[in-house]
Amino acid sequence: MVPILLQLKVHPRVASATSGFTYFWIASNNFLKLLVEGLLDYELILSFTVIGVLITILSLLVDLYLLE
C-alpha cells in the first residue's frame, strides 16, 4: 500500500501512518470476530497481553540504558 501512496505523491509519513492504521484496523476486526464467535481463550489473551507489556517495558529500559 505504501508504494502506491508514494507514487501518488503522498508524504512518506502520511503513507506510513495510513498503512499502519489499515493493518491495525484489519487485525482489530479479525480479533473482534474471533472474540464474538467464542474461538479465543481469555486466559491465553491475558497471558500474552501481560507478557507483551512486560517485554515492552523491559526493552524500553534496555534502550534507555544503552542511550545513556
Image (cartoon, rainbow, N blue to C red):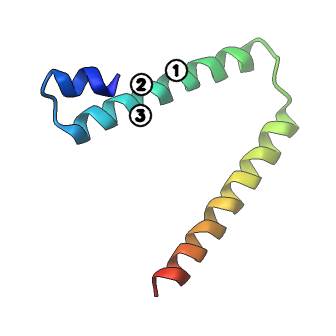
Furthest residue in direction left, as rendered: 9
Crowd class of label 3 (few under 14; some 14 to 19; many from 20; radius 10 Å): few
Q: Disc 3 designates what residue?
A: 20
**Is residue 9 found left or right of 40 in the rendered image?**
left
Q: Position of residue 9 (x, y in %)?
A: 12, 27
Camera-side residue of 12 and 22: 12
For badge 2, the amino acid type reads Thr
| Label 3 close to label 1 by CB (< 8 Å) | no
Separation of residues labelled 3 and 1 (CA atoms): 10 Å
Q: Disc 2 designates what residue?
A: 22
Give the structural element (helix, strand or loop) at label 1. helix
Residue at image coords 82%, 17%: 39
Give the structural element (helix, strand or loop) at label 3. helix
| Label 3 close to label 2 by CB (< 8 Å) | yes
In the rendered image, the vertical position of residue 57 relative to residue 14, given as above or below? below
Q: Disc 1 designates what residue?
A: 26
